[in-house]
Image: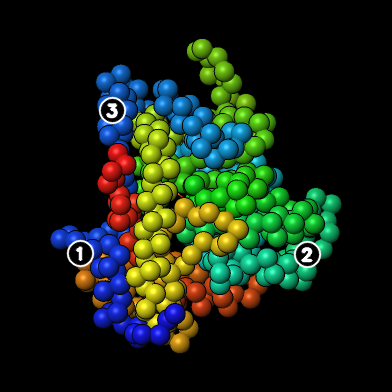
């Protein structure tokens, strides 16, 4: 029951302190957890000299990542943006095409589309999950799509719509079944931007396994970090082989000769980064447990704060709770920015959501549907500290 206190710094700070205590230093939004094995494995790279584009940790990381997600294959890359670009390319996205993406996302989603020479086409998200709203997608396609020889064409721009990109926002799985059904009906390949959702499942299956291909990120602020890095996930062996080939300069195997059979990329993840990834995969279940506990704690301690709710996982999903978010009610949104400043000043790092894509200068002219919910949410969300080690029982007893 929400009734006691108004939304203000005087109600938010006590709730924050009840959840995560009071630190001497700034409590960061999200800091990595580097287990002891990280030191061992990185030292092994240094000791053996295998620090760069060859070495055993890359293959090991790929195998263990595939096992952790239940995916047939994982191909490690230099970052998540590169992984996403290659996903689009392998799905057949070509220069001059359009790719449907949420207007509420990190800029890399739209950039990866442009890196293929295509144009993002923005649709709205849902209030519950912050990811593509199936009704908005359906409505948009029913207005603009006409059948073409190689998939639907946008009748307004005459560009082919060659993929839909579903991003699982802040780690919470999107409305996957409905989106998959719409994509199948319109014969548009689905790519998942699972950059934020490693460890999140939808109806028992890991995110990133519903589209043709998906991308994850291991940037410094993600649930698992390799310093910088990413991966392509797919259940299709041939696509995985192609992804590996194209991201490693399209070199045909030979002990010493340099023969390349396509314009490839140097998108390899260095061995030293993969070593960090292997170490953290070993503790991923523990991190997921801790982040869930932290989220539950926030839900409790913010219970009494009026006009704000802690974003929770949808009932059909198990979320990694990558970043916890307070969602303010619309009538108090004007107070958001002042609150963000006050919470930061009090020693708790917090951030707004991204600026909507269509409000960035390079995407202002991109095709789009109605984006009212995206715009509203971008004025109302505050991301709050979410590191695994802030959880109430972090490493007490278990280790
Ligand atoms: C982090 C992120 C990416 C990009 O990953 P990098 O590894 O930083 O290139 C893409 N999409 C979303 C939604 C992200 O959060």
One can see residue 95 in this view: no
User: Which mark is drawn over residue 31?
Assistant: none
Task: Please report whichever mark, 1 or 2, sits nearer to the chain's N-terminal start.
Answer: 1
Q: Which residue occupies 48% across, 83% down?
A: 330
Which of the two residues, 324 or 191, is positioned nearer the viewer here?
A: 324
Mark 1 to mark 2 CA distance (whole Å): 54 Å
Nearer to me, 195 or 309:
309
Camera-nearest label, 1 or 2: 1
What residue sits 19% from the left and 61% below the top?
A: 23
Taking the image as shown, residue 296 lies to the left or right of residue 242, namely: left
- Horizontal relation, residue 283 to residue 241: left or right: left
Instruction: Give how far apart the Cα atoms at labels 1 and 3 are.
Output: 32 Å
* Horizontal side, residue 259 vs residue 275: left or right: right
Residue 343 placement (x, y as % from top left): 27, 72
Nearer to us of marks 1 and 3 is 1
Q: Position of residue 336 (x, y in %)?
A: 37, 79
Labels 2 & 3 near each other (Cβ < 8 A)? no
In the structure shown, which secondary structural element does the residue marked by tag 1 occupy? Answer: loop
Residue under numbered circle 1: 22
Instruction: Label 2, secondary structure: give it.
Output: strand
Query: Label 2, on which residue?
Result: 145
The image position of residue 64, as x and y in percent, is: 49, 32
* Vertical side of 4 occupied by 220: above or below: above
Q: Could you say which disc has been placed on residue 40 in the image?
A: 3
- Residue shown at 55%/14% (left/top)? 254
User: Mark 2 vs mark 3: which is more N-terminal?
Assistant: 3
**Numbered disc 3: secondary structure:** helix
Q: Is residue 341 above or below residue 99?
A: below
Image height of 215 relative to 120, above or below: above
């Amino acid at each position: 029951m929400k009734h006691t206190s108004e939304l203000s710094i005087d109600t938010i700070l006590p709730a924050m302190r009840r959840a995560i205590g009071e630190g001497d230093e700034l409590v960061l939004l999200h800091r990595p957890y580097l287990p002891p094995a990280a030191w061992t494995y990185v030292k092994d790279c240094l000791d053996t000299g295998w620090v760069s584009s060859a070495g055993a940790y890359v293959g090991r990381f790929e195998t263990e990542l595939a096992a952790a997600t239940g995916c047939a294959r994982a191909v490690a890359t230099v970052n998540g943006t590169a992984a996403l670009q290659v996903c689009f390319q392998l799905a057949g996205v070509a220069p001059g095409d359009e790719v449907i993406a949420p207007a509420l996302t990190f800029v890399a989603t739209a950039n990866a589309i442009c890196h293929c020479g295509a144009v993002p086409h923005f649709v709205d998200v849902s209030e519950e999950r912050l990811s593509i709203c199936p009704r908005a997608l359906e409505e948009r396609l029913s207005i603009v799509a006409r059948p073409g020889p190689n998939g639907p064409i946008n009748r307004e721009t005459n560009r082919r719509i060659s993929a839909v990109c579903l991003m699982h926002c802040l780690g919470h799985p999107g409305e996957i079944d409905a989106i998959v059904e719409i994509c199948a009906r319109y014969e548009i390949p689905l790519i998942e931007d699972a950059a934020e959702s490693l460890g999140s499942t939808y109806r028992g299956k890991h995110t990133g396994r519903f589209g043709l291909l998906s991308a994850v990120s291991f940037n410094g602020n993600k649930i698992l970090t390799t310093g910088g890095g990413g991966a392509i996930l797919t259940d299709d062996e041939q696509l995985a082989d192609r992804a590996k080939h194209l991201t490693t300069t399209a070199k045909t195997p030979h002990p010493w000769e340099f023969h390349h059979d396509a314009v490839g990329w140097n998108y390899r993840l260095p061995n030293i980064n993969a070593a960090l990834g292997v170490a953290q995969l070993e503790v991923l279940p523990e991190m997921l447990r801790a982040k869930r506990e932290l989220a539950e704690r926030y839900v409790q301690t913010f219970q009494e704060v009026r006009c704000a709710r802690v974003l929770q996982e949808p009932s059909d999903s198990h979320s990694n709770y990558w970043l916890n978010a307070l969602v303010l009610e619309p009538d108090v949104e004007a107070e958001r920015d002042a609150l963000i400043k006050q919470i930061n000043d009090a020693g708790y790092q917090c951030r707004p959501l991204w600026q909507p894509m269509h409000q960035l200068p390079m995407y202002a002219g991109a095709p789009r549907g109605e984006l009212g919910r995206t715009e509203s949410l971008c004025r109302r969300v505050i991301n709050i500290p979410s590191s695994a080690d802030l959880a109430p029982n972090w490493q007490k007893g278990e280790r």
